[in-house]
Image: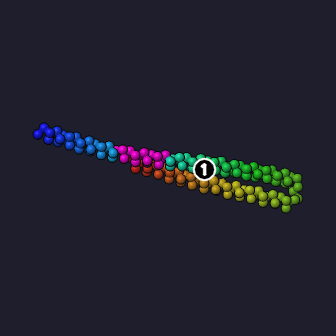
């Protein structure tokens, strides 16, 4: 009888330990899933940061182009004023310079439009990335 009750206790202990082990395995598995989600979010945030850096670089380049164009326009304007003061009679030459200035203005307007579109696209991408991260964090909880 003693042997039997000792055997029963051992079986109960084994069963309890087995249940605890099973529970611990489940907890470890859940933690591993959380770690994977956190790693995914980290990768996404790094990609997002890189996108922002690329955007800032493009923004700086576009701004430089616009500044260069503005300088050209100012130079053309100064030339036009000088030419006008020097010879009011040379209308064809003035018309040519005026056309050049108009083309530069059109270029500048086009560059500004492209810059606005790029900025709008980044705003949308920014919103999307934040939504994705929020969704990802909600799923983790």
Nearer to the camera, 35 or 92 = 35
- In-front residue for pair 17/91: 17
- Answer with left or right where residue 52 lies relative to residue 24: right
User: Magenta region's main secondary structure?
Assistant: helix
Of residue 107 and residue 90, the one placed in the foreground of this image is 107
Q: Is residue 4 positioned above or below 129 on the image?
A: above
Q: Residue furthest bottom?
A: 92
Task: Residue 8: name its quadrant.
Answer: top left
Residue 116 drawn above or below residue 5: below
Label 1: state its secondary structure.
Answer: helix
Whole-percent x, y for residue 35 in the image: 42, 45
Q: Which residues are magenta?
A: 27-42
- Residue, x 43% and y 51% (percent of image)? 135
Whether residue 34 appears in magenta in the rendering, the answer is: yes
Residue 28 coordinates in the image, percent (x, y): 36, 44
Q: Residue at coordinates 43% horizontally, 47% vertically from top-left?
A: 36
Which residue does the image show at 57% across and 50% down from the upper left?
A: 51
Residue 136 placement (x, y as % from top left): 43, 50
Q: Which residue is mark 1?
A: 55
Q: Nearer the viewer, residue 95 or 67?
A: 67
Q: Assess whether residue 78 is covered by the magenta stretch.
A: no
């Amino acid at each position: 009888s003693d042997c039997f009750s000792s055997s029963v206790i051992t079986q109960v202990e084994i069963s309890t330990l087995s249940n605890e082990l099973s529970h611990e395995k489940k907890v470890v598995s859940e933690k591993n899933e959380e770690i994977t989600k956190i790693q995914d979010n980290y990768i996404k945030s790094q990609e997002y940061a890189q996108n922002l850096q690329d955007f800032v670089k493009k923004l700086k380049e576009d701004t430089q182009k616009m500044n260069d164009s503005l300088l050209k326009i100012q130079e053309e304007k100064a030339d036009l004023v000088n030419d006008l003061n020097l010879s009011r009679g040379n209308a064809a030459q003035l018309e040519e310079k005026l056309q050049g200035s108009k083309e530069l203005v059109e270029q500048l307007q086009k560059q500004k439009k492209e810059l606005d579109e790029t900025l709008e696209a980044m705003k949308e991408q920014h919103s999307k990335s934040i939504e994705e991260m929020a969704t990802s964090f909600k799923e983790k909880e």
